[in-house]
Image: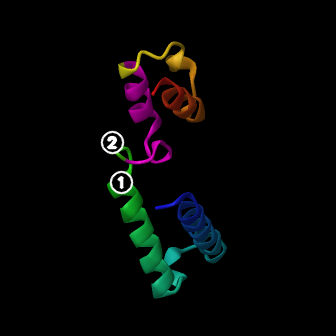
Amino acid sequence: MTRKQTEAARRNVQKAQAGARKKKTISKLSPKTRSELGKQGAAARKRGGEPGHRLEDRTRQDLYAEASKLDIPGRSKMGKGDLIQAIRRAR
């Protein structure tokens, strides 16, 4: 997925979640919306953290492990964004 697609998917999920909060339940959303939410969630779970995928899609733990392999100093105090930048610089 491209960054634009990822951001669009995130917006769609947030919009659906906001709608669900108003209605107090996801079951009141349209079947199409529920289906799309399920597909997006499944795709995110499937790709999350696997090597070969974008750094932004990985968890902080995965990024920390990668930083350890690259022996990046100060990695324990870094957040996810900092780890991504440090890994890119180290490669």
Q: Could you say whether the residue bearing mark 2 is in a helix, strand or loop?
A: loop
How many marks are shown on the rendered structure? 2
Image location (x, y in percent) of residue 73: 51, 13
Q: Nearer the viewer, residue 61 or 63?
A: 63
Q: Quadrant of residue 65?
A: top left
Placement of 18 over or under 85, stated as above or below: below
Instruction: Estimate the x, y position of residue 42 in percent, counting from the top left.
Output: 36, 64
Name the residue tied to disc 2. Answer: 51
* Magenta highlight range: 53-68
Residue 52 x %, y %: 34, 45
Tell me if mark 1 has few (under 14), some (14-19) or many (20+) residues whose alpha carbon lies within 10 angstroms of its own: some
Q: Nearer the viewer, mark 2 or mark 1?
A: 2
**Real-space Cα distance between discs 2 and 1?**
9 Å
Residue farthest along the top direction in this orientation: 73
Residue 83, above or below 57: above
Residue 10 lies left or right of residue 62; in this view the side is right
Residue 29, located in which quarter of the rendered image? bottom right
At a point 41% along the width and 71% down the height, the residue shown is: 38
Residue flagged by tag 1: what amino acid is it?
A: Arg
Task: Judge by depth and name the residue closer to the eye, 46 or 71.
Answer: 71
Residue 47, label in figure: 1
Residue under the image location 56 percent in, 19 percent down: 77
Q: Residue at x 46, y 76 (%)?
A: 36
Secondary element under disc 1, as helix, strand or loop, is helix
Are the residues at dot 2 and dot 1 in contact (C-beta closer than 8 Å)?
A: no
The local crowd at label 2, few if under 14, some if 14 to 19, many if 20 or more residues have their Cα within 10 Å, is few
Left or right: where 49 falls relative to 10: left
Q: Which quarter of the picture shows residue 31?
A: bottom left
Assign the magenta stretch its main secondary structure: helix
